Image (cartoon, grey):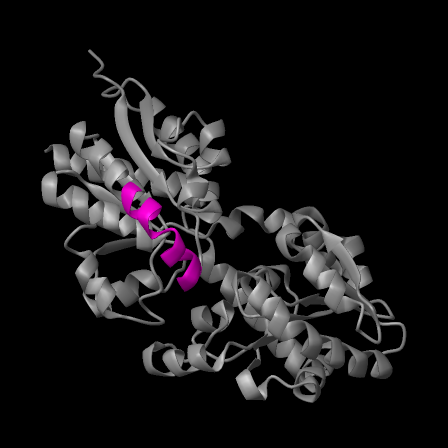
Amino acid sequence: MASAPLDVFIVAGEQSGDELGGPLMQALRAEVLKLDSLQGVAFRGVGGPAMTRNGLKSLFPMSDIAVMGFLPVIARLPTLLARIRATADAVIARPPDVLVIIDSPDFTHRVARRVRKHVPSLPIVDYVSPTVWAWRPGRARRMRAYVDHLLALLPFEPQAHARLGGPACTYVGHPLIERLDVLRPSVEDARRRDAVPPTLVVLPGSRRSEVERLMDVFGQAVALLAQEFPGLDIVLPAVPHVEALVREKAQGWKYPPRIVLGEAEKFAAFRQARAALAASGTVTLELALSGVPTTVAYRVSKAEEWIARRLVTTQFAALPNIILGEGVLPEFMQDACTPKALAQSTAQLLRNGPERARQVKAFERIADAMILPDGRSPSAKAAQVILQQVAERAR
């Protein structure tokens, strides 16, 4: 006779985690349907719109804890501490079959530590590894006290955790590999990619601080490129919360970009772009999977630079370079991030030549490294590992 539904307590602290949590909930439902020992699955926890659409009734609005930056966190600290206690207490009061925490380690790991202290037998799974391979590597070993299994989005992370003494870790795939059909160019897109004048996609970041520091230098670099490539089609995808700032800054560009909004427009630009000039971040991985040769740039404050030089342990900043273990995408950071340097690098990518060919060839290796050998989606693979953890703890 079938048992009660599987009780899953799931916690996401910001939009990116919510977007992982929604598909994970769907995948868990699908996997549980295959099991005679369980009668469905029930979800409790904290999440946003994607998880709500999949049946979660959040303990409180996720916006209460979706705070970034040192000063905003300090301002909201009483609320954040109260939400950590409330979330952990809900788990402790009625222990589920498994606790799944998703990203946002400043919030979710505090919940997990509190739960582990009071319910030591409860399996805890962490979906998305903190960047222990880039900075503060000691976090990996400390996680073993309250995380039973880690679900990694990047293929090198299981090896990194094994080296650093972290918890057991399984590569489940990055959600971008489920979107290769919208990232990769069609035959018509490929023709446009090779057309004259070329399309250059410019991505100065999704945070106000990034836009403030990069828009002017990007605009000057684009001006140099537009002189060398007459009629250059300049496309700048923007996100809503920095759109006004981007438009304000773009007014000062000698060659104003064509600003597009929304993910569909962004990916459409990627499919036709000949090259890209981008702030370091997840977008560099999107561009690599789209096959767009890219120049990477970044600037932070002097204080942040001072801290980074003492804490950051990775050789590269761009995710494609970290995955490949080599500097395929040129990176221009801090004082090296000048209009002339960015323009010279990007010009080589707009032309046919060895630098462009080197990146295009390397992108094939990135896709091969990220696609799961069994063909499963990241969400399905994550669900499978979570159920394995539940089964092992039940023995």
- Which residue reaches farthest right? 231
Residue drawn where x is 36% and y is 31% of the image: 28
Relative to residue 327, is residue 381 drawn left or right? left
Work out whether 219 lies above or below 40: below
For residue 70: magenta? Answer: yes
Work out whether 90 lies above or below 164: above
Relative to residue 253, is residue 244 drawn left or right? left
- Which residue reaches farthest top? 1
Q: Position of residue 204 (x, y in %)?
A: 64, 68
Q: Position of residue 17 (x, y in %)?
A: 43, 46
Q: Is residue 294 visible?
A: no
Give the number of marks: 0
**Quadrant (top left/top right/bottom left/bottom right) for the N terminus:** top left
Q: Nearer the viewer, residue 373 or 219?
A: 219
Q: Nearer the viewer, residue 355 or 59?
A: 59
Q: Main secondary structure of the magenta part?
A: helix
Q: Position of residue 224 (x, y in %)?
A: 79, 83
What range of the chain is rendered magenta?
69-82
Residue drawn where x is 44% and y is 72% of the image: 322
For residue 370: magenta? Answer: no
Q: Is residue 75 visible?
A: yes
Work out whether 147 lies above or below 292: above
Q: Position of residue 342 (x, y in %)?
A: 67, 82
